[in-house]
Amino acid sequence: MTPELQRMDWMPSPPLAPIDSPLDLDHLSRMTLGDADLEQEVLAMFAEQAVRLIAAMTGLPAEAGALAHKLKGSARGIGAFAVADAAASLETAIQIGQNERHAFAALKEAVTETRAAIEAILKS
């Protein structure tokens, strides 16, 4: 005997990261095992690293793709998915040789927004 199948209407999934924040704090908490001190330390380290990497990518030197890749991984680790997506877009733009400056500007904007969110968290 087979169970009755019921028709279910399609519902969109909730976003993976909160739309109103550049950081997925649930993801960050999972990655730090809920250790609030570690969360703060990781956020501060990311904010500093992001500034250094963006500065190193200015002018789009030959190693800009590798630097964008590094930033993408770090961003995913802390739940800064907008930064990760923008870094991935820059990687792709560099690989295909199109829109690199536009992709870099978008990455800088994502980093700026994320750093502002991190600053607010660290001050609280």
Image (tube, rainbow, N blue to C red):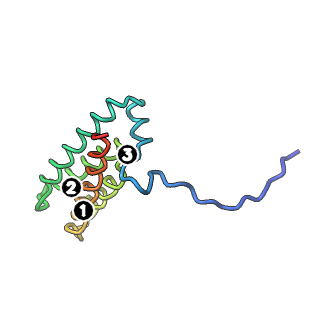
Q: Secondary structure at mark 2?
A: helix
- Name the residue carrying label 3: 79
Q: Amino acid at mark 1?
A: Gln
Q: Residues within 10 Å of mark 1 (few under 14, many from 20)?
A: few
Q: Nearer the viewer, residue 48 or 53?
A: 48
Q: Amino acid at mark 3?
A: Gly
Callouts 1 and 2 close, C-beta under 8 Å: yes
Q: Farthest right residue? A: 1
Q: Secondary structure at mark 1?
A: helix
Residue 43 location in percent, x, y? 28, 40
Q: CA distance from mark 1 to mark 2?
A: 8 Å
> Any mark on residue 65, and which?
2
Residue drawn at the location 26% of the way across and 50% of the way down: 115
Left or right side of 82 for 63: left
- Name the residue carrying label 1: 95
Q: CA distance from mark 2 to mark 3?
A: 21 Å
Q: In the rendered structure, which disc, 3 or 1, sits on the residue that comes first in sequence?
A: 3
Q: Nearer the viewer, residue 45 or 71?
A: 45
Q: Is residue 4 above or below residue 9?
A: above
Q: Amino acid at mark 2?
A: Gly
Q: Farthest front residue? A: 124
- Location of the N terminus (image quadrant): top right
Q: CA distance from mark 3 to mark 1?
A: 25 Å
Look at discs 1 and 2 and give the one toward the viewer.
2
Q: In the rendered structure, which disc, 1 or 2, sits on the residue that comes first in sequence?
A: 2
Residue 103 location in percent, x, y? 25, 65
Q: Where is residue 97, by image quadrant?
A: bottom left
